[in-house]
Image (tube, helix red, strand yellow):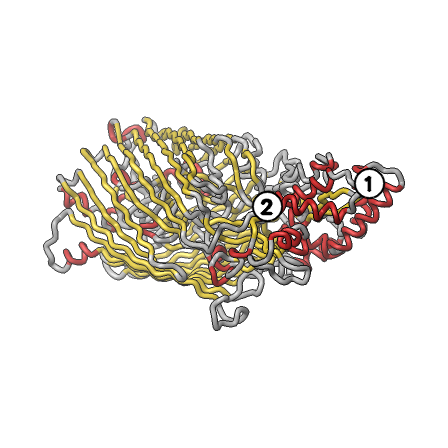
């Protein structure tokens, strides 16, 4: 009996489980079928997952936490799309940089480009290569083609090696042999109701799917989606530099060094120290609001074509081509306007009971995209360079104070005078200059993002135990053996600004940059005590260019005294290798050079630079001393004395060249199907993680002479301090490196789902995530950026009244402290209610869905610096025909 239960992990078991989850209107072949009355339906206890162990297994007996959205849950969700519904899962956190771009994370240390969380479609990574992470779901499946979603919240590196140290999501699509026919989906909606930044805007999404089995051997499918809308607006005017002129008593609107969150061009690299009336003032360029330098129009046009060939009863070969062109807003350390962005992917995949293999090639072209901060900075500088602007500001201030104006009024007068001739938003001249900057590929003078990057990946895994059994070898019934290997190469066309080829002997501008990794794993499992105890051990090794081989073990145990009660325990470790951007970036970014942390990119900079934090503190102390010095000395004399008094404030850069991140994770959990028919399903998990060598950024400046000659460690401190007190004496760098902190975090989650008589499905889940402690903390690690508590409540029924159904989901998350390179501060708590009602027309096969996300329209932000998210109200109509 135990052996028969284990055999259900094959392809036939998957077919049976998915069949049980099909819509009531049709079987896999599309023919009508009878459905048992809802009050007598039983919960499927044989539902399978793949992502947790790379083999099909019962979701109840998964050795690690795995969350799944099955077809029924997809039909009940009030979310506008399946991708939005992921936010309802326990243990999952979602950030919203824009309407068409959401970022999935789990278990802390979230950011808007989450390279710690992998996103797969049918096992194929859909990341944008140069970013190192996916851009939402732009290269993923449509709502018509999605079958199920599996999310592993927690490190999965031992099996996948895809830098999945925080988890992964796998989207399964509909096989054309089993899901034939034509389907059309039209969503029409509206958002920005009550938005003070913009009036109501239309939203539209059109999707088409056609699948056909040409014979019992050949089938194909084709999907297309066109989405149009208007993005959420980021217009946070919180002041980031309130004490920029504290020594002169200027605060608030009187502070000439203001730096609002979503106003760009007035950041630290856009500020100068001006001597006015014998005192020193920090003065920033005026800058522009984000809404001035970007379009919030949203557009996504994507499609895919798949051809499938059956090779046997349980083996299949398929080729898939995916393409997406889109306009959107995206965020890293700065915010970007993505326009004409193009992603393409070719994938060849073999699936079978013994061998599974994939090979895919992803191409990325950034189109006419540009950096919003650089655009704002260079709009100001293009009409008047900093030196000329500072001179005009000083002259106007002197004239105003001579005419009797007070300091604050004179500063405002000086800004107006220095800004004369400045490009004004809404004018033709402004639009033309912005367009010009969008095409200049150097962020010191332009804003263009011009990257062409490719990803080539091949992998294979073999079920060794199954192969031996088919070959006649008598293995113990409870023994499982699995092995796999993979290779990945990133290939980048150097653009001269964002990337160059630093390899010795290569032309930095004409030779493609290649960055590769090779890895493999072996896994052994045993089923003991009449299948009540399942043990697995996995060992993975990965070798990345520029790094030594790294080993990741995973040990798991599942104890199932009955099929309905399952206790799990796992220990595993994981490495994250630096992404392309972290290792090789070469960006002139607003007079700060952002360079990769590999020695081949930043040789000598770490050894001869000083921390920007200490330089800022040093220069603030020098300014305070000068402004507080009542003597008759000249400003130059006061400056020299202040530099000498404060030069020991400078701190040499203690960081060094980048190395991989590392995590160790311990997890235990319990999953059960309780009550008659297993109607009550419960899942609880606890975990404890230890991180070290966080990959993060540090700003450090190298002292140099006014002629640009670097001063090395042999130079006396006084000369170095004098150089760093002036902007012309600083070679500014933002370096990718590793935190020196040892960080621990822990947490857990609980979910309950109850199938009530009559077809009602009630659900509740809660997640607790806690930063435990930091040893030898240097504050350089990524911000935890995660609420301590979050919960979801849901209620739904597909047939609540005749053909009418509904779905409700209420989400709440606690406030949390957000720490990013854009802004630090508290993200307020928020709550959101999503709701939908559906009406199904059996003939013709029509389904109407009227829904809303954030139906109460309470605007909120998911992270600081991001947009305000309001309500999206929509009507979706789906028509299907065999």
Q: Is residue 676 above or below residue 659?
A: above
Quote the CA–CA distance across marks 2 and 1. Answer: 35 Å
> Alpha-carbon neighbours of circle 2 within 10 Å: few (<14), some, or many (≥20)?
few
x and y, in percent, of residue 308 in the image: 34, 60
Element under disc 2: helix
Question: Label 2: which residue?
Answer: 648
Compared across the picture, whether 240 is left or right of 161 comes to right
Q: Residue at x 49, y 33 (%)?
A: 834
Compared across the picture, whether 244 is left or right of 808 comes to right
Q: Nearer the viewer, mark 2 or mark 1?
A: 2
The answer to whether marks 2 and 1 mark residues whose Cβ atoms lie closer than 8 Å is: no
Q: Residue at x 73, y 54 (%)?
A: 386
Question: Label 1: which residue?
Answer: 410
Q: Residue at x 65, y 41 (%)?
A: 621
Residue toward you, 580 or 486: 580
Residue 788 at least partly seen: yes
Instruction: Looking at the image, tell me whether mark 2 or mark 1 is earlier in sequence order.
Output: 1
Q: Is residue 341 above or below residue 846?
A: below
């Amino acid at each position: 009996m135990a052996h028969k239960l284990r055999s259900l992990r094959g392809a036939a078991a998957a077919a049976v489980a998915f069949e049980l989850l099909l819509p009531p209107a049709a079987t896999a072949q599309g023919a009508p079928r009878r459905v048992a009355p809802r009050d007598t339906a039983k919960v499927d206890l044989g539902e399978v997952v793949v992502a947790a162990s790379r083999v099909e297994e019962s979701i109840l007996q998964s050795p690690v936490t795995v969350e799944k959205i099955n077809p029924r849950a997809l039909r009940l969700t009030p979310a506008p799309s399946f991708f939005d519904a992921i936010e309802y899962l326990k243990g999952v956190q979602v950030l919203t940089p824009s309407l068409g771009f959401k970022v999935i994370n789990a278990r802390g240390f979230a950011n808007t480009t989450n390279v710690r969380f992998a996103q797969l479609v049918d096992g194929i990574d859909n990341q944008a290569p140069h970013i190192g992470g996916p851009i939402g779901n732009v290269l993923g499946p449509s709502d018509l083609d999605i079958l199920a979603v599996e999310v592993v919240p927690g490190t999965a590196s031992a099996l996948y090696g895809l830098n999945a140290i925080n988890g992964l999501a796998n989207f399964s699509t509909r096989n054309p042999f089993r899901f034939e026919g034509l389907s059309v989906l039209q969503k029409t909606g509206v958002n920005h109701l009550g938005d003070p930044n913009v009036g109501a805007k239309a939203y539209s999404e059109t999707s088409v799917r056609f699948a056909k089995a040409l014979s019992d051997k050949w089938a194909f499918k084709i999907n297309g989606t066109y989405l149009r809308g208007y993005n959420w607006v980021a217009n946070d005017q919180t002041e980031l530099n309130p004490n920029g002129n504290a020594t002169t008593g200027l605060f608030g609107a009187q502070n000439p060094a203001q730096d609002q969150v979503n106003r760009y061009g007035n950041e630290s690299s856009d500020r100068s120290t001006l001597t006015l009336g014998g005192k020193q003032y920090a003065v920033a360029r005026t800058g522009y609001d984000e809404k001035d330098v970007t379009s919030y129009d949203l557009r996504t046009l994507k499609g895919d074509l798949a051809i499938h060939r059956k090779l046997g009863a349980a083996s299949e070969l398929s080729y898939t081509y995916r393409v997406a062109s889109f306009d959107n807003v995206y965020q890293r350390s700065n915010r970007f306007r993505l326009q004409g962005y193009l992603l393409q992917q070719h994938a060849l995949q073999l699936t079978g009971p013994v061998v599974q293999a994939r090979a895919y090639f992803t191409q990325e072209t950034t189109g006419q995209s540009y950096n919003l901060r650089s655009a704002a900075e260079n709009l100001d500088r293009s009409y008047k360079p900093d030196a000329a602007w500072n001179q005009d500001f000083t002259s106007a201030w002197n004239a105003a104070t001579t005419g009797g104006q007070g300091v604050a009024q004179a500063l405002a007068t000086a800004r107006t005078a220095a800004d004369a001739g400045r490009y004004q938003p809404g004018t033709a001249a402004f639009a033309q200059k912005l367009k010009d900057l969008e095409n200049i590929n150097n962020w010191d003078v332009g804003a263009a993002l011009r990257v062409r990057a490719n990803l080539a990946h091949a992998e294979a895994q073999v079920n060794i135990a199954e192969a031996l059994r088919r070959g006649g070898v008598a293995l113990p019934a409870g023994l499982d053996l699995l092995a796999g290997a993979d290779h990945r190469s990133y290939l980048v066309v150097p653009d001269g600004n964002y990337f160059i080829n630093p390899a010795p002997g290569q032309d930095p501008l004409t030779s493609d940059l290649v960055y590769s990794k090779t890895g493999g794993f072996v896994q052994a499992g045993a089923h003991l005590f009449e299948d009540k105890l399942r043990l697995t051990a996995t060992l993975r090794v990965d070798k990345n260019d520029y790094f030594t081989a790294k080993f990741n073990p995973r040990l798991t145990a599942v104890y199932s005294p009955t099929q309905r009660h399952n206790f799990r325990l796992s220990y595993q470790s994981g490495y994250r290798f630096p992404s392309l951007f972290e290792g090789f970036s070469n960006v002139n970014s607003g007079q700060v050079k952002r360079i990769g942390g590999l020695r081949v990119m930043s040789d000598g900079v770490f050894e001869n630079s000083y921390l920007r934090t200490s330089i800022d503190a040093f220069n603030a102390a020098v300014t305070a001393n000068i402004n507080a010095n009542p003597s008759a000395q000249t400003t130059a004399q006061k400056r020299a004395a202040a530099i000498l008094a404060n030069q020991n404030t400078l701190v040499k850069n203690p960081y060094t060249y980048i190395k991989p991140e590392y995590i160790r994770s311990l997890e235990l959990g319990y999953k059960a199907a309780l009550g008659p028919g297993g109607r009550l399903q419960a899942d609880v998990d606890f975990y404890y993680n230890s991180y070290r060598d966080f990959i993060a950024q540090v700003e450090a400046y190298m002292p140099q002479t006014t002629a640009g000659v670097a001063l090395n460690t042999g130079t006396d401190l006084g000369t170095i301090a004098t150089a760093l007190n002036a902007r012309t004496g600083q070679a500014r760098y933002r370096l990718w490196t590793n935190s020196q902190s040892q960080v621990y975090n822990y947490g857990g989650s609980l979910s309950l789902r109850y199938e009530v008589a009559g077809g009602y499905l009630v659900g509740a889940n809660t997640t607790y995530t806690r930063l435990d402690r930091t040893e030898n903390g240097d504050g350089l690690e990524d911000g935890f950026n995660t609420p301590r508590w979050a919960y979801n409540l849901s209620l739904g029924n597909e047939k609540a009244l005749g053909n009418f159904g509904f779905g409700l989901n209420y989400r709440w998350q606690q406030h949390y402290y957000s720490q990013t390179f854009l802004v630090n501060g508290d993200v307020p708590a928020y709550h959101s209610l999503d709701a939908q009602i559906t009406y199904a027309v059996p003939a013709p096969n029509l389904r109407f869905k009227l829904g809303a996300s954030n139906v109460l329209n309470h605007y909120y932000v998911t992270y600081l610096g991001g947009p305000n998210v309001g309500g999206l109200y929509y009507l979706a109509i789906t028509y299907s025909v065999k």
